[in-house]
Amino acid sequence: MPTERLSMRHIREVLRLHYSVGMSQRTIARSLGLAQGTVCKYLNMARRAGLTWPLPPELNDEVRL
């Protein structure tokens, strides 16, 4: 089953909850109503892209990860 495609706003929230708050992938998935695989996918994509928290200001809602 394919994972969901998230808006940049949702991706930022996943990253914030993981890196700033320290939430687990399972807890993030539950709190945002996402599949755990989706959370894992976007955290891995961000890690491979070298993204850190907080995100650079140029990564706005129009950017695709």
Image (cartoon, helix red, strand yellow):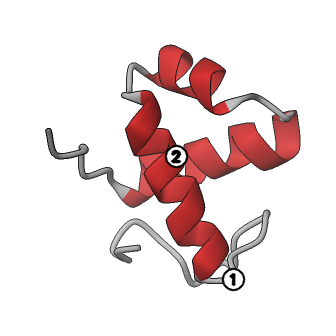
Residue lying furthest front in this view?
A: 1
Towards the viewer: 6 or 59 = 6
- Percent across and percent down for residue 5 are 24, 52
Q: Are marks 2 and 1 in contact (CB under 8 Å)?
A: no
Q: In which quarter of the image is residue 65?
A: bottom left
Identify the residue at horizontal 78%, vertical 64% (top origin): 54
**Residue at label 2?**
40
- Percent across and percent down for residue 6 are 32, 50
* Mark number, residue 4: none
The local secondary structure at tag 1 comes to: loop
Identify the residue at horizontal 68%, vertical 76% (top origin): 51
- Percent across and percent down for residue 31 are 54, 16
- Percent across and percent down for residue 44 are 56, 62
Q: Quadrant of residue 8?
A: bottom left
**Residue at label 1?**
50
Report whether 45 appears left or right of 63.
right
